[in-house]
Amino acid sequence: MCLAIPGKIISIDNQIDDIFRIAKVSFDGIVKDVNLAMVPEAQIGDYVLVHVGSAISIVDEQEAKETMDILYQMDEITELSYGNTPPEKPQELVENQEKNEPKDTEKE
């Protein structure tokens, strides 16, 4: 299943021309770079639906908030923070990090 996540445009940082623009979009505090080529009329403060890094439509604030609420209830938002495989428990993050840290093998 593919999802489009609503977010608010907080800045437009990279603009090659009127069509190709990259914006910073906030998804409930998580900020990602988003391509605005499909919504050239989008401006700072607009809410957009984002699918795989591209804004695909502009939505009103109420629709954006309702959609985010539904996604939280469905537990679909964790991918924004953890990628495609969210950890089962926060403790797993600590354990995985410890496993991947280089060991000091020097002898004194």
Image (cartoon, rainbow, N blue to C red):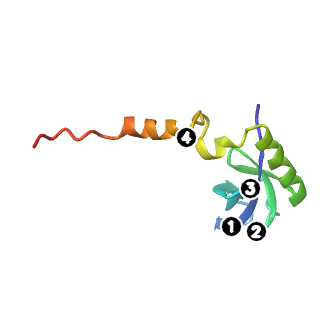
Q: Amino acid at mark 2?
A: Ile
Q: Amino acid at mark 3?
A: Ala
Q: Which residue is mark 2?
A: 44
Residue at 70% of width from left, 59% of height from top? 26
Q: Crowding near pointer 2: few (<14 within 10 Å), some, many (20+)?
A: few
Which of disc 1 and disc 4 is earlier in sequence?
Answer: 1
Which of disc 2 and disc 1 is earlier in sequence?
Answer: 1
- Quarter of the picture holding the C terminus: top left
Compute the Cα span from label 2 to label 3. Answer: 14 Å
Mark drawn on residue 37 = 3
Which of disc 3 and disc 2 is earlier in sequence?
Answer: 3
- Please state the horizontal and vertical placement of residue 43, each as a whole percent of the image: 78, 67
Q: Amino acid at mark 4?
A: Pro
Compute the Cα span from label 3 to label 1. Answer: 12 Å
Instruction: Out of 82 and 47, give the one closest to the viewer.
Output: 82
Which of disc 3 and disc 4 is earlier in sequence?
Answer: 3
- Please state the horizontal and vertical placement of residue 24, each as a whole percent of the image: 66, 61
Nearer the observer: mark 3 or 1; the answer is 1
Q: Is residue 49 left or right of residue 32?
A: right
Local secondary structure at mark 3: loop
Nearer the observer: mark 2 or 3; the answer is 2
Compute the Cα span from label 4 to label 1. Answer: 34 Å
Check whether the beta carbons of the residues at disc 4 and disc 2 lie within 8 A of each other.
no
Q: Which residue is mark 4?
A: 90
